[in-house]
Image: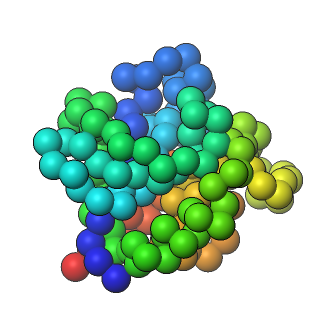
């Protein structure tokens, strides 16, 4: 286990879909990423499921502090990369946000929402129940040491 970050995208910096996601989740955020490696100069190697990219992907992202909030968390990075390699063709799950508000709504195979993917890579129990607000709270309540 090592210290890394959960990165949360500030919804008001994004587009209409970002604001809709934020409103449904009752969170100031619309997306999250698990940082795999800090590349320096505000650039990070990240894994998440992204509506902009159509699903699960690994990507280098420049994270401006005015657009992103980074919370330090403990993570088994090797596990997260193995988890990604087994699921890298999974699509983005547009309806999963409803599942975080209405438990048991549905749970499709081979589709993931960003906070669900990050919660699963962090090995949290019932990752499908994690919306952005709940995952952010978890990160604050479980500080990396």
Q: Residue 18: image x %, image y %?
A: 52, 27
Outermost residue, left direction?
Answer: 41
**Residue lying at 40% horizontally and 51% vertically, measured from the top left:** 46
- Looking at the image, can residue 73 be seen? yes
**Residue lying at 57% horizontally and 63% vertically, measured from the top left:** 84
Q: Residue 68: image x %, image y %?
A: 31, 38
**Residue lying at 43% horizontally and 76% vertically, measured from the top left:** 78
Would you say 83 lies left or right of 4 here?
A: right
Q: In which quarter of the image is residue 38?
A: bottom left
Nearer-the-camera pick, 129 or 123: 123
Nearer-the-camera pick, 97 or 89: 89
Q: Residue 120: image x %, image y %?
A: 58, 68
Q: Residue 82: image x %, image y %?
A: 54, 72
Would you say 41 lies left or right of 116 here?
A: left
Outermost residue, bottom direction?
Answer: 1
Quadrant location, the N terminus: bottom left
**Residue lying at 84% horizontally and 54% vertically, measured from the top left:** 108
Outermost residue, top direction?
Answer: 16
- Looking at the image, can residue 134 be seen? no
Q: Could you tell me how many numbered marks the image carries?
A: 0
């Amino acid at each position: 286990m090592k210290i890394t970050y959960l990165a949360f995208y500030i919804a008001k910096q994004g587009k209409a879909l970002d604001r809709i996601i934020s409103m449904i989740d009752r969170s100031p955020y619309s997306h999250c990423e698990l940082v795999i490696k800090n590349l320096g100069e505000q650039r990070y190697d990240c894994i998440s499921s992204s509506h902009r990219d159509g699903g699960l992907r690994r990507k280098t992202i420049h994270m401006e502090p005015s657009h992103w909030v980074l919370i330090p968390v403990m993570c088994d990075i090797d596990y997260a990369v193995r988890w990604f390699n087994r699921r890298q063709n999974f699509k983005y799950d547009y309806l999963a946000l409803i599942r975080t508000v209405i438990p048991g709504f549905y749970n499709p195979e081979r589709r993931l929402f960003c906070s669900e993917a990050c919660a699963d890579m962090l090995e949290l129990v019932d990752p499908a129940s994690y919306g952005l607000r709940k995952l952010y709270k978890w990160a604050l309540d479980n500080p990396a040491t």
